[in-house]
Amino acid sequence: MKYPKGIKPQPKGSARRTRTLDGKVKYGSRGMTLEKDLDQTNAYYLETGRAVIHKKPTPVQIVNVDYPSRRKAKIDEAYFKVPSTSDYNGIYRGRYIDFEAKETRNDKRFPFINIHEHQVDHMKRCHDQGGIVFIIIKFSLYDETYLMPIGHFLPFWEAFLNGGRKSIRYTDIKDASLLLKQGMNPRIGYLDAVDEFYFENGE
Amino acid sequence: MKYPKGIKPQPKGSARRTRTLDGKVKYGSRGMTLEKDLDQTNAYYLETGRAVIHKKPTPVQIVNVDYPSRRKAKIDEAYFKVPSTSDYNGIYRGRYIDFEAKETRNDKRFPFINIHEHQVDHMKRCHDQGGIVFIIIKFSLYDETYLMPIGHFLPFWEAFLNGGRKSIRYTDIKDASLLLKQGMNPRIGYLDAVDEFYFENGE
């Protein structure tokens, strides 16, 4: 069977256990789905001239580089670094846009363990500077993806830092976020939600 | 002798030949000066709340990761990728800002060999979207650093793509750019030039 470019069928029995690059245990093969869907979405927005939004490269500490030939440099020792910013940023309708995207297989809550404090600090700063800042949260089990404006996220985060809940309840996310429409092209039309929340409502 | 944090004396006889990561031969040890000065400058702008601007991580294609222990992931095979965007972006005065920074030891011209076509295409797109976009060019031999707005850079680039000069003359850069003040903190106060060109002149 032939699938459209970039689309691969889910393997059967996909709830197998895998270990991700940062050592966390993840269940199922859907862990990278959101990232791939956003890559496809951003490529679509770029091609159609709607926005220029990119995922930043994974930050890596390069320790040693080998030169097996004059033309090819091979990195043979490097380590993952903790990111100091969010993963996605760019420009849309003349505005700076910045977001982080996270996926959970939890069916009741989004645990903060998925997010680094550095990243939230960064997003807060961008928000203070007048940027459009949010978190995209996918609940894999429901196949639902939400856009949560940073202003709605921060109260939960600050309560957590002050000893409160270590997660946001699914129901709270539903109440404080926009549900994103999913399709073929773009896969996750998050800019329609940005239009609705940041432009049409006059924020 | 003790030097302030982050400042190292230039080694004597610094005009030795070195090979950079992408295989190009570079002369002298000053190749990384501009990048370090911009890192310090951006850290200063971040601390003082003036702007949120970061250098993107070097894009790397990770091929293999080894797990010598449960907690530590070691990348033991990876390769440098050609960047598809410019190196720096962020938000300033509510606006999206995007730039590339390049250094040359040439005393008469800035050769285009220093810039990838992908990067210019990216900057053009950001410019079309209403972002503040420019190239910072340092002439190491003169210790002069210029901010060249992308609108001033593109005519030279397009002439080059159509078979014209493979470089921009130093004198042309001088005429079409803002000379950046250098200091201790920030080292390269490029946002003052941004204020002057993009805000005070009404662009």
Image (cartoon, coloured by chain):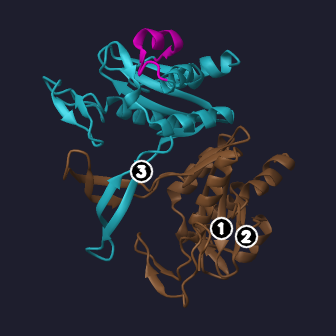
Chain colours: A brown, B cyan
Question: Mark 3–mark 2 contact, CB under 8 Å?
Answer: no
Q: Regarding mark 1 in the picture, which secondary structure is present there?
A: strand
* Residue at left offset 54%, top offset 27%: B134
Q: CA distance from mark 2 to mark 1?
A: 9 Å
- Could you confirm whether marks 3 and 2 are on the same chain? no
* Quarter of image, res B108: top left
Of badges 3 and 1, the one in the foreground is 3
Horizontal and vertical percent position of residue B141: 29, 16
Identified by mark 3, the residue type is Pro
Horizontal and vertical percent position of residue B79: 33, 54
Write the start and end of the magenta stretch as one range. Answer: B163-180
Horizontal and vertical percent position of residue A129: 65, 40
Where residue A32 is drawn, which disc sits there?
Answer: none
- Residue extending farthest right: A201
Where residue A137 is drawn, which disc sits there?
Answer: 1
User: Is residue A17 at least partly visible in the picture?
Assistant: yes
Q: Provide the residue designation for mark 3.
A: B59
* Residue at left offset 31%, top offset 18%: B106
* Residue at left offset 70%, top offset 80%: A142
